Image (spheres, rainbow, N blue to C red):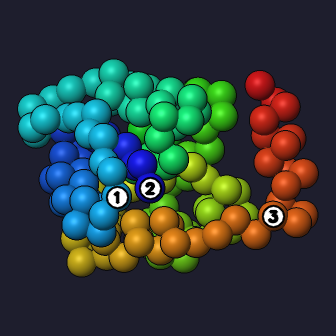
Amino acid sequence: MRIGVASDHAGFRYKTLVAQHLRDLGHEVRDFGAWSEEPVDYPDLIHPLAIAVAGGELDRGVVFGGSGNGEAMAANRVRGVRCAVSWDSESARLSRAHNDANVLSVGQRLVSEDQILAIVDVWLAAPFEGGRHVARIRKLDEAW
């Protein structure tokens, strides 16, 4: 799978950890930054990742920040992106199963390091259930 990763300074450590984990699993990983824990403006890094996902250059994206909220807001500004903030494996699974989320956002300050890889793995593996959820996603897309 082609997966993009991006973060602000507050999510840099998890971004780096997850990027290596994804490479170890055999995924093609494109890193959009941040490149350190020096302060950066997250829209400058998240927006290009979201455009790449929406445009089909990437299959999925995973973004990180302190809480993950701002990063999700930035990603969701791009038509065709469905970015969900997740804080545990079940919220990640449901974001795929019910919302067909193509970008995952996680807050490094809110999720423990021993949980992060499991959250990402569950999110990547969870299938979209389709069915009644298709019409709801269509309505999301029509709102643009």
CA gap between label 2 and label 1 equals 5 Å
Residue 27 vs residue 91, the one in the foreground: 27
Position of the N terminus by quadrant: bottom left
Residue 109 vs residue 58, the one in the foreground: 58
Decide if residue 81 is on the left or right side of residue 124. Answer: right
Mark 1 or mark 3: whose residue is earlier in sequence: 1
Residue type beneath disc 1: His
Query: Mark number for residue 11?
Result: none
Decide if residue 130 is on the left or right side of residue 87. Answer: right
CA gap between label 1 and label 3 equals 25 Å
Residue 143 vs residue 58, the one in the foreground: 58
Residue 105: horizontal and vertical position, in percent? Answer: 44, 51
Q: Which residue is mark 2?
A: 1
Residue 38: horizontal and vertical position, in percent? Answer: 9, 32
Instruction: Please determine whether, in this image, residue 49 is positioned above or below residue 138.
Output: above
Residue type beneath disc 2: Met
Instruction: Please determine whether, in this image, residue 102 is positioned above or below residue 123.
Output: above
Query: Mark number for residue 130?
Result: 3
